[in-house]
Image (cartoon, rainbow, N blue to C red):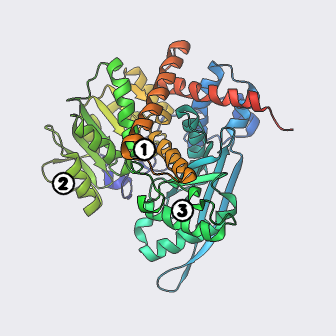
Amino acid sequence: MSSIASKNAKKSAPAAKGSKTAAASKGSGGELIQHPIFDELGFQTDPNNLYRQTVSSMLQAADLMNLPSRLKLILAQPKNEIMVNFPVRMDDGEFRLFKGYRVQHNNALGPYKGGLRFHPDVHLDDVKSLAFLMTMKCSLVGVPFGGGKGGIKVDPYKHTKTEMERIVRRFTAAIAHQIGPDYDIPAPDVGSNSQHMAWIADTYSFLSEVGGHQPEAVITGKPVEFGGSVGREKATGQGVVDTLVEMLPEIGVDIKGCKVSILGYGNVGSWTGRILHDRGAKIVAVMDHTGGILSESGLDAHALAAHCSKVGGVAGFKGAERIDADEFYSTKVDVFVPAALEQMIQEPEARMIQCKVVAEGANAPTTPAGERVLESRGIEVLPAILCNAGGVTVSYFEWVQNKTCRAWDLEEVDAQLNKHMVRAAAKVRDARKKYKCNLRTAAYIAALERLRAAYEIRGLFP
Ligand code: GLU
């Protein structure tokens, strides 16, 4: 069935978001989740709407912990939704108009923080969901940031480097007065990379009034040669592995020798694969937009990463057998890592997956309906706001290094990251014990506890 090719064309992530394509037509099975907050705020009534789905998971936790209703209202909508349209000259001399976004969800705990996604499918609702998740993630992992997200509706792989530079710089100019090192600090996300971050920092430093006052701290995920941090590139994957090391023992899985499949082999998937490989795990199956591959004896995760950066996907990797999407999902493993886009694990995929634990490397990869199926089958889900928080944690370290004019070494970065991940995992475990709920609800409860405390102390202006 569902050949991967029929799903979509993306560089490092397989298949389009389910709500919009194949998976939706398979019937994502989501009934409309109800909550009085949705009516009060006039939410979209599409059961597949990502923003409604994301907020509903938070509200479940908020109800369980008796979060005051005013906080549910505040957190159910972002503070600011910024949309810009800007013209850019292409290499052939013609102009094209691009749409960009920056959503600032919440800054009760510190400046807005979160990535910029460059993808042809970027929409306001996705960006709102991702900004919301950043607020929760930053709170849970204990960094002094709020949540934001942005993006440009563009396929970065269809433009030359010079066109991308003009697109990125012009977008930066369009939002320059809405971001800042102490106000809103973007970073990479799907489709954007450290070169893009360098252009943003450079453009911002020209346009901003702060001049020599560490303007490069306006953005993280920069190249190490220009204000970036060692360990940032692999940080999200490292965080996934740190989370697994913490959580696997109680699920009865040993990392050494455990079997892993990975959906998406871009930054998050490939670093998770490489680090797990180095710790003795066996990466047996990987799928991306170019197809699926399998090797029962284990793939060489490093060679696969090198292959992907050379040819743009996993297809054609030697020493592995080609498999289709159904075979990929049905491969028996211990750990399944979705590391691509949102809403990829819907009911049909959730029924096929054969694993003990799903470690969410991507943001919001599992729909509520998919999660119910996984739960009914006894599969544990390590939620994204815990599992993929390593990226923003090391972004925080990069920002601290910029602000203090210091450069940490990799040992320090990794040790500090591990400390944050271990602490966050412990908070999630404690919440699960106290509220007898699943790990996603527990993660939201732990995140909401910190936000509740901040709001109680700060009060509400005026
Ligand atoms: N885009 C990444 C995320 O979703 C990183 C954000 C950041 O470093 O600010 O967590």
Give the Cα separation between the discs numbered 2 and 1. Answer: 27 Å
List x then y, in percent, for residue 185: 59, 53
Q: Residue furthest bottom?
A: 93
* Amino acid residing under circle 1: Ala
* Amino acid residing under circle 2: Phe
Instruction: Name the residue that disc number 3 marks.
Output: 153
Give the Cα separation between the discs numbered 1 and 3. Answer: 22 Å
Are the residues tagged 2 and 3 within 8 Å (C-beta)?
no
Give the residue displayed 31% in from the left and 48% down from the top: 270
Quadrant of res 210: bottom right
Quadrant of res 159: bottom left
Quadrant assignment for the N terminus: top left
Are the residues tagged 1 and 3 within 8 Å (C-beta)?
no
List x then y, in percent, for residue 248: 33, 24
Pointer 2: residues within 10 angstroms few (<14), some, or many (20+)?
A: some
Mark 1 and mark 3 lie on one chain; the one further toward the N terminus is 1
Give the residue displayed 69% in from the left and 23% down from the top: 67
Quadrant of res 348: top left
Q: Going by the image, does 302 lie left or right of 353?
A: left
Quadrant assignment for the C terminus: top right
Q: Is mark 1 within 8 Å of ligand 1?
A: no
Q: Nearer the viewer, residue 94 or 189?
A: 189
Mark 2 and mark 3 lie on one chain; the one further toward the N terminus is 3
Instruction: Name the residue that disc number 2 marks.
Output: 317
* Amino acid residing under circle 3: Lys
Are the residues tagged 2 and 1 within 8 Å (C-beta)?
no
List x then y, in percent, for residue 122: 53, 56
List x then y, in percent, for residue 253: 28, 23
Does dot 2 land on a helix, a strand or a loop? loop
Give the residue displayed 56% in from the left and 54% down from the top: 186
Q: For residue 23, which numbered disc appears in the image?
A: 1
Give the Cα separation between the discs numbered 2 and 3. Answer: 31 Å
